[in-house]
Image (spheres, coloured by chain):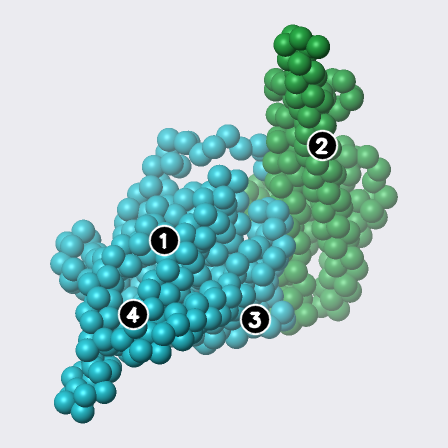
């Protein structure tokens, strides 16, 4: 075998190594995106689980705020039942709005606001909401890394070969964000959820 | 990020190497003078390995107990736990253990050899004086130290350099005592005196080495990374401004642990590097671990204005 033959073998071996390494890297990145996605789910469930407790506590002090309480319960049910990314995001945004309304209403009940259980629930919900936001942020970062890998050369060749599809960012719906703002006028709808 | 982790791991190996070399050298010299042959060398090797091993696996416990940090109660400090957990998710690291230091001075530090064994401690003063957004900024700064392994270099440096400083101190003492007793002719005074003097000369070099390892640059980097996590520069800016306005000193902090805190817990004396007057003593400046808060705030403000943060994917509101 001549020199050209050897060079060809070396080139083929290098190519195979590149293929394996890139394929594994893409799989790792895709798995990270999926792990980040399930983290969002975990946090959303956590929030859903907190709400019945919160509603019960508020009922004890502010039973005639029925409308607000009903809205929270309904929004929670819809959020639990929602299927698919878009529907889920929409339902969660409505739920966030309903919760803000509930906390705004509770401002009028000093005894409720002094209730330790209520304060703990409020902190827990604020914490969960920021965890949801952070897990979405982390998810988006993983998507950015993954999408960059499958769209830039040379890894895009491998991505095309094995059908790695680009993933979409998790973005809040413009419309539902406006809804929240309409509810509270000039109030602090922009900051984290403690009204 | 990955380059910084690699560079921190390299620096840690460098520190360990210098430490072992120095200890073995001292052991050899002592062995020669005391005519106990290789026992000095052997003892030093065992001592060095033991100390390195100990500082790698126990540095977090040492740093925490030196600052009298207590585990934070999940119910009593629910907000702190929630903030740490949320930001850990954003940083993609496991939630570190959370500790509280009973102290009026607002300050915080992180420790641990890797994210899996990390711990974050904040003072009660910090929780009293900062609101949620500001606390989030500070915790994000600390988590950035954890994420890029700054805590590994810092805690190892603290322990190993502490040992050397202790040795130098001990040798100097031995020199004084030995000096008085040298007429007994046991030959102990002279070698200890020489080593003591040697260490005295080497000490500033060690300090320089520490400075190199625990470069002030990393505080700026942790500030920037922290803001990248919270997407909210104002939180950290306001927190640093509050720290700047506060003059309380952390009681349990010493020079050995100064590197760990978010703000230098000792360089608070009026005549030190505050306001750029640079009237601190030569030794103090050599050991100065943190850039002035003014500079850090200015840097954060500038990046906010210029929008010079790395490109970020959107952070959705909910």
Tell me the crowding category of disc 3: few under 14, some 14 to 19, or many 20 or more residues within 10 angstroms, Cα based.
some
Which mark identifies residue A134? none
Residue A156 spot, x, y in % from top left: 67, 19
Label whose residue precedes the other's in the sequence (3 or 1): 3
| Residue occupied by mark 3 | B72
Residue A40 in view in this figure: yes
Query: Between residues B190 and A135, which one lies in front from this camera angle?
Result: B190
Closer to viewer: mark 3 or mark 2: 2
Closer to viewer: mark 4 or mark 1: 4
Asked whether the beta carbons under mark 3 and mark 2 sit within 8 Å of each other, the answer is no
Q: Secondary structure at mark 4?
A: helix
Asked whether the beta carbons under mark 2 and mark 4 sit within 8 Å of each other, the answer is no
Label whose residue precedes the other's in the sequence (3 or 4): 4
Q: Check the residue under mark 1 and report the chain it is in.
A: B
**Gap in Å between the C-alphas at discs 3 and 4?**
47 Å
Which mark identifies residue A24? 2
Quarter of the image for the C terminus of chain B: give it: top right
Q: Secondary structure at mark 1?
A: loop
Q: Check the residue under mark 4 and report the chain it is in.
A: B
| Residue occupied by mark 4 | B29
Query: Between residues A144 and A92, which one lies in front from this camera angle?
Result: A144
Q: Residue at x 74, y 66 (%)?
A: A57
Q: Which chain is green?
A: A
Asked whether the beta carbons under mark 1 and mark 2 sit within 8 Å of each other, the answer is no
Closer to viewer: mark 2 or mark 4: 4
Residue A63 appears left or right of B45: right
Q: Residue at x 83, y 47 (%)?
A: A80
Q: Is residue B202 above or below residue B292?
A: below
Which mark identifies residue B214? 1
Are labels 1 and 2 on one chain? Answer: no
Residue A93 spot, x, y in % from top left: 70, 41
């Amino acid at each position: 075998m001549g020199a050209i033959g050897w060079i060809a073998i070396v080139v083929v071996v290098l190519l195979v190594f590149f293929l394996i390494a890139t394929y594994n890297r893409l799989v790792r990145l895709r798995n990270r995106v999926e792990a980040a996605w399930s983290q969002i789910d975990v946090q959303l469930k956590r929030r859903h689980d907190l709400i019945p407790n919160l509603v019960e506590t508020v009922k004890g002090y502010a039973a005639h705020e029925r409308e607000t309480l009903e809205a929270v319960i309904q929004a929670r049910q819809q959020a639990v039942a929602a299927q698919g990314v878009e529907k889920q995001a929409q339902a969660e945004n409505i739920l966030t709005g309903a919760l803000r309304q509930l906390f705004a209403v509770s401002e009028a009940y000093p005894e409720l606001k002094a209730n330790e259980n209520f304060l703990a629930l409020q902190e827990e919900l604020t914490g969960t909401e920021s965890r949801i936001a952070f897990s979405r942020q982390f998810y988006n970062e993983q998507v950015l890394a993954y999408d960059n890998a499958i769209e830039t050369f040379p890894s895009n060749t491998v991505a095309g070969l094995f059908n790695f599809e680009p993933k979409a960012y998790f973005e809040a719906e413009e419309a539902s964000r406006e809804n929240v703002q309409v509810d509270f006028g000039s109030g602090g709808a922009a900051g984290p959820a403690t009204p | 990020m990955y380059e910084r982790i690699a560079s921190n791991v390299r620096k840690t190996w460098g520190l360990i190497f210098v430490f072992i070399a120095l200890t073995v050298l001292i052991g050899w010299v002592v062995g020669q003078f005391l005519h106990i042959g290789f026992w000095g060398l052997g003892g030093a090797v065992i001592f060095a390995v033991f100390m390195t091993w100990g500082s790698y696996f126990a540095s977090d416990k040492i740093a925490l107990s030196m600052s009298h940090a207590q585990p934070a109660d999940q119910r009593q400090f629910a907000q702190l736990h929630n903030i740490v957990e949320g930001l850990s998710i954003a940083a993609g690291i496991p939630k570190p253990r959370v500790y509280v230091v009973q102290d009026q001075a607002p300050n915080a530090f992180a420790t641990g050899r890797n994210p899996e064994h990390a711990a974050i401690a904040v003072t009660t003063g910090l929780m009293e004086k900062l609101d949620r957004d500001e606390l989030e900024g500070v915790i994000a700064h600390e988590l950035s130290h954890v994420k890029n392994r700054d805590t590994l270099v810092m805690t190892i440096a603290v322990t190993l350099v502490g040992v050397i400083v202790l040795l130098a101190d001990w040798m100097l003492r031995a020199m004084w005592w030995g000096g008085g007793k040298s007429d007994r002719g046991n030959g102990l005074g002279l070698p200890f005196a020489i080593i003591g003097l040697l260490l005295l000369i080497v000490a500033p070099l060690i300090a320089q080495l520490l400075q190199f390892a625990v470069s002030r640059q990393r505080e700026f980097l942790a500030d920037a990374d922290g803001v990248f996590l919270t997407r909210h520069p104002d939180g950290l800016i306001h927190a640093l401004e509050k720290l700047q306005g506060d003059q309380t000193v952390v009681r349990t902090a010493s020079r050995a642990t100064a590197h760990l805190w978010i703000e230098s817990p000792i360089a608070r004396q009026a005549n030190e590097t505050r306001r750029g007057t640079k009237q601190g003593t030569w030794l103090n400046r050599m050991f100065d671990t943190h850039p002035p808060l003014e500079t850090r705030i200015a840097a954060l403000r500038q990046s906010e204005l210029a929008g010079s943060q790395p490109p970020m994917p959107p952070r959705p509101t909910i």
